[in-house]
Image: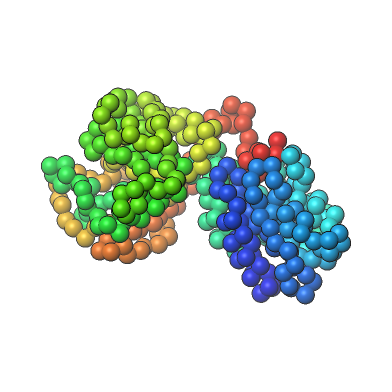
Amino acid sequence: MASTAEHDAMRRALANALRGPRGVNPQVGAVLLSPGGEIIAEGWHRGAGTPHAEVDALSQLAPGAARGATAVVTLEPCNHTGRTGPCSEALIAAGVSRVVYAIADPGDHSSGGATRLRAAGVEVEAGLLADEATALLDSWLTVQRLGRPHVTVKWAQSLDGRAAASDGTSQWITGSAARADVHRRRAEADAIVAGTGTVLADDPALTARADDGSLLPHQPLPVVLGTRPVPDEAALRRHPREFLQYPGNRSAGGLAAALDDLRRRGVQRVFVEGGPAVAASFVREQLADELLVYVAPVLLGGDRLALDDIGVTTIGDAKRLAVASVTPLGDDLLLVAHPTTPPAAVHAAHRAGGHVGRSSSEGDE
């Protein structure tokens, strides 16, 4: 069982992981403890081709100084040779006697580090603060496990589930605090998705903006789903990044093709807020990993529902959700939920001969 010192070290390792760049590489942190439980070194992964977190920490010690130490790592040490050698072998060579990690490496080529360590006589414990590490790596893990980007579907609605008044007006259902939260989350995404219906009806900029209207430093790639052309005068054409348009339909195949292409472009986190039809298509095809629902204390009535048909015809077909949090934002509420049915994978990447895992993501091949 993990000690108090190891719990504290894992929290520090998680903080260290955040110091590394977020992108196609997993953010990984490591802490080395002396046999007495004191921190003797720490490290993190700094980008493709650089030493992994465990090796980064070991590099700060004199030869032999890690003998008998415990390595606390947010992700299972890899067991793959690419641009860098396997971390499992580096830990064995350094004389580490115990390894504690949070979550297993899901890669086809890079997993197996725990087995290699145990075979060498190293004590291994898995699962320490696994929920926290999973939350840190949620988008990367989705890419590795499902072969597609992590998808967050967002919508704003009245208390009675409407996205707009009967005449189509919808700005603003929610207040400034909720809108600021949306823009912060947009800035954390790699791509933002809307349908052509929303582009034509609302003329959204699909940018991430500060409270004063200025653009935030990171702007998600704008993506449009649908066959209708984007007008020359559309605000989307003034986005600092050129938008992509996928003309396929919103069936499972069309969405999967779009997600697979985005994955190949390095997109790991997709933020969908393109109207009731687009939101419903991702939910219906089980391609939504997270739902963000901003609920305003207003009543609108009418038929402008916040979510279109998701294929539920009887109560037994209802799509069940696990509520992760409910957060007040001014007068509004943000409800974060996750589907209880396992989300769908995109298999095109595997059919095309691609593979996923820590090694390829970190550029070690």
Q: How is the image coloured?
A: rainbow
Horizontal side of residue 140 vs 104, given as left or right: left
Residue farthest to the right, as pictured: 64
Residue ID at (59%, 56%): 19
Rendered location of residue 283, percent (x, y): 38, 43
The quarter of the picture where residue 174 lies is: bottom left
Rendered location of residue 38, percent (x, y): 73, 73
Rendered location of residue 102, percent (x, y): 64, 59
Q: Observer-nearest residue: 248 or 53?
A: 53
Rendered location of residue 297, percent (x, y): 21, 60
Residue farthest to the left, as pictured: 167
Q: Is residue 100 above or below residue 339?
A: below
Horizontal side of residue 88 vs 154, given as left or right: right
Residue 63 shows in the view: yes
Horizontal side of residue 361 vs 241, given as left or right: right
How many labels sit on residues?
0
Residue 345 shows in the view: no
The quarter of the rendered structure image containing the C terminus is top right
Q: Observer-nearest residue: 11 or 249?
A: 11
Residue ID at (79%, 66%): 69
Residue ID at (33%, 28%): 226
The quarter of the picture where residue 295 lies is: bottom left
The quarter of the rendered structure image containing the N terminus is bottom right
Q: Is residue 349 above or below residue 173?
A: above
Q: Observer-nearest residue: 323 or 226?
A: 226
Residue ID at (69%, 54%): 53
